[in-house]
Amino acid sequence: MKNTNNETQAQTLTRLLAAADRQHPVTITYTKADGTQTIRTIEIYDTRTTKAGDIILKVMDRESGESRTFRLDRIQAYTVHRTAYTVARPARDGETTVALPVASAPATVIGREIARDDAAYYADRYAVLAAA
């Protein structure tokens, strides 16, 4: 089990993305917003960056069989398993994804996540800065 306080967030993200690329499930210790801890075995199928800058993992929860999201900064510890995915993930409705190579530098991963965010939001934001 790896404790996330012993590594950077970029290292944690890189290892979790490698597990997703290999389709290996991960057991996480997660702290919810209310402070309670839970242990879940998940199958990661996507990552996103919120407008607030938080990195979230879109996963299938093995216990419930449903899609869930987890914030990366709230994962306290994790273990990558060597078994294969078993839970079917939801169908995508015209959604496009960017394939992330395992050996990507953290800056590359973050850059790709930002590029997938709402382009109009960033266009408006930079237009205000350019006008000032």
Image (cartoon, rainbow, N blue to C red):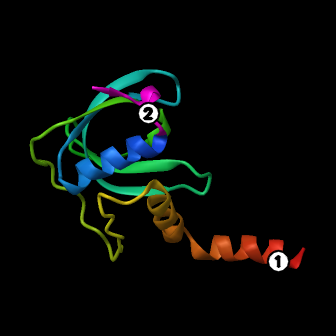
Where is residue 38 shown, x and y percent of the image?
A: 35, 25
Which residue position is annotated with label 2?
7
Closer to the camera in the image, 106 or 118: 106
Picture layout, residue 54 above or below residue 28: below
Where disc 2 sits, the SS reads loop
Q: Is residue 2 magenta?
A: yes
| Disc on the earlier residue, 2 or 1 | 2
Q: Name which residue lies at 35% across and 70% down.
A: 97
Q: Using the numbered discs, state the Cα–Cα distance from disc 2 to disc 1 in whole angstroms.
A: 37 Å
Which residue position is annotated with label 1?
130
- Residue range corresponding to the magenta coloring: 1-8
In the picture, measured across the screen, residue 101 lies left or right of residue 57, that is left
Where is residue 128 shown, x and y percent of the image?
A: 82, 73
Q: Is residue 65 magenta?
A: no
Q: Name which residue lies at 54% across and 55% down.
A: 50
Q: Name which residue lies at 44% across and 33% down.
A: 7
User: Label 1 amino acid?
Assistant: Ala
Closer to the camera in the image, 97 or 65: 97
Q: Quadrant of the N terminus?
A: top left
In the picture, measured across the screen, residue 82 lies left or right of residue 35, that is left
| Dot 2 alpha-carbon crowd within 10 angstroms: few under 14, some 14 to 19, many 20 or more | few
Question: How many marks overall?
Answer: 2
Picture layout, residue 119 above or below residue 112: below
User: Label 2 amino acid?
Assistant: Glu
Closer to the camera in the image, 49 or 89: 49
Q: Quadrant of the C terminus?
A: bottom right
